[in-house]
């Protein structure tokens, strides 16, 4: 595929699928022009219009679940990262992943396996090292504050901190055994480093 580029701000951080929540110091990308991102891009259309190895940090906050080819997108994000660059992915955990009509999938603690070259069950050819994985019972506070009453928001945040404490002692056990006992988890976050 031929790499096409657009003029981008001189930032080395990318906020993929920014929606209404743009981040200062980032190139903010979204498919909806009316949201006025820095770059308008259909995120299902690859490659993205940025040079290889440009970004030291990429964040994709609740984006991959809307896209048709998450492994191809992960390979594209790998291309865009500098060597040693950080990739932060936040997606719905499968226990709550299908509460939005446009979500195509939920995610699990096994997602990082597919980026480990030693994984014989289905390595996808994109080498990323998982540095941290975290589950969140109450996610996206920046959005939640706009849609729920303040007392409900703060109660949710408080309960979330308690549930998160136990969940993150062992995300594998939580994800496989008890996540549904607390109504499911809204988010799982992966922090990868480009190998």
Image (tube, grey):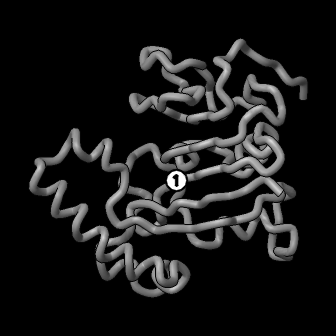
Q: Is residue 33 left or right of residue 117?
A: left
Residue under the image location 47 percent in, 83 percent down: 169
Total marks shown come to 1
Q: Is residue 193 above or below residue 11?
A: below
Q: Is residue 167 above or below residue 86?
A: below
Residue 42 spot, x, y in % from top left: 62, 26
Residue 98 spot, x, y in % from top left: 42, 57
Q: Secondary structure at mark 1?
A: strand
Q: Is residue 177 left or right of residue 41?
A: left
In this rendered view, identify the residue nearer to me: 85 or 125.
85
In this rendered view, identify the residue nearer to me: 127 or 181.
127
Residue under the image location 60 percent in, 67 percent down: 132
Residue 187 spot, x, y in % from top left: 44, 60
Q: Is residue 184 left or right of residue 42?
A: left
Instruction: Tell me the quarter of the picture where residue 40 sits.
Output: top right
Q: Is residue 156 above or below residue 142?
A: below
Say whether residue 29 is visible.
Answer: no
Q: Quadrant of the N terminus?
A: top right
Residue 82 spot, x, y in % from top left: 80, 41
Residue under the image location 51 percent in, 54 percent down: 91
Residue under the image location 31 percent in, 82 percent down: 181
Residue sticking out furthest to the right: 1
In this rendered view, identify the residue nearer to me: 176 or 143.
143
Instruction: Tell me the quarter of the picture where residue 9 sits.
Output: top right
Say whether residue 22 is visible.
Answer: yes
Q: Quadrant of the C terminus?
A: bottom right
Q: Pointer 1: what residue? A: 90
Residues packed near mark 1 inside 10 Å, few (<14), some (14 to 19) or many (20 plus): many
Q: Is residue 37 above or below residue 47?
A: above
């Amino acid at each position: 595929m031929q790499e096409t580029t657009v003029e981008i701000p001189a930032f080395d951080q990318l906020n993929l699928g920014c929606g209404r929540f743009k981040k200062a110091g980032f190139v903010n990308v979204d498919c909806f022009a009316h949201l006025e991102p820095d770059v308008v891009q259909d995120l299902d259309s690859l490659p993205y219009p940025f040079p290889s190895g440009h970004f030291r940090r990429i964040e994709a906050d609740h984006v991959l679940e809307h896209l048709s080819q998450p492994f191809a997108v992960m390979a594209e994000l790998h291309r865009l990262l500098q060597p040693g660059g950080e990739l932060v992915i936040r997606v719905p955990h499968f226990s709550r992943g299908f509460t939005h009509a446009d979500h195509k999938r939920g995610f699990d603690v096994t997602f990082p396996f597919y980026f480990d070259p030693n994984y014989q069950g289905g390595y996808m050819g994109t080498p990323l090292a998982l540095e941290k994985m975290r589950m969140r019972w109450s996610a996206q506070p920046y959005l939640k504050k706009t849609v729920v009453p303040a007392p409900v928001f703060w109660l949710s945040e408080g309960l979330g901190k308690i549930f998160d404490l136990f969940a993150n002692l062992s995300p594998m056990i939580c994800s496989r055994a008890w996540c549904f006992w607390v109504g499911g988890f809204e988010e799982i976050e992966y922090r990868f480093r480009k190998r």
